[in-house]
Amino acid sequence: MATLELTSENFATTIENSDTLVIDFWAAWCGPCRMFAPVFEATSEKHGDVTFAKLDTEANGEIAAALEISSIPTLMAFRGGVLVYRNAGAMNAAGFEQLVNAVKELDIDEVRAQAEQAKAQHESE
């Protein structure tokens, strides 16, 4: 599957419409981002059942600011529209492969149920 380029126009719908989504927040001037890019692309080719997307933090500063992206690269993973992983820093190929497989193995219904429970608890406080 080709890597999607995220913008303010497709960011929310991509999260909503993807069962499993991995996003790389990057910028052209970032050395570690450039080093991680081939790892991200190679892994995306192995997992046709996962949506891989990249968001240029320079071109989409409003999204990066809203998500409080302070270091790049930052990776986020969503399962069933719920954020299940967020971490700054590049990963090696084996570590990234392990992360993608772990996210894929999460039960979407369980993730959503836990998210709803956390939301209800937060609203009652």
Image (cartoon, helix red, strand yellow):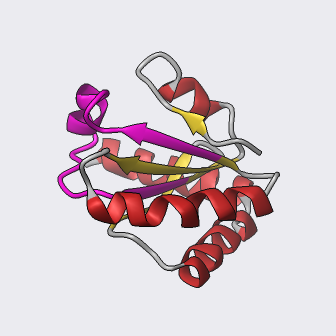
Task: Name the quadrant containing residue 42.
Answer: bottom right
Direction right: furthest residue: 48
Q: Please name the residue shown 56% across and 73% down the image.
A: 96
Find residue 67 and report its image quarter: top left
Instruction: In this rendered view, identify the residue nearer to me: 34 or 85.
Output: 34
Give the farthest residue toward the top: 9
Residue 76 x %, y %: 45, 55
Residue at image position (47%, 16%) is: 9
Q: Is residue 19 magenta?
A: no
Q: Position of residue 26 (x, y in %)?
A: 35, 48
Of residue 52 and residue 82, the one placed in the foreground of this image is: 52
Tell me if residue 65 comes above or below residue 62 in the rendering.
Answer: below
Q: Is residue 54 magenta?
A: yes
Left or right of 11 on screen, residue 86: left
Against 51, is 8 above or below?
Answer: above
Q: In the figure, 69 relative to 37: above or below?
A: above
Q: Position of residue 120 (x, y in %)?
A: 43, 45
18 left or right, relative to 125:
right
- Magenta segment boundaries in residue numbering: 52-77
94 relative to 68 in the view: left or right: right
Q: Position of residue 62 (x, y in %)?
A: 24, 26
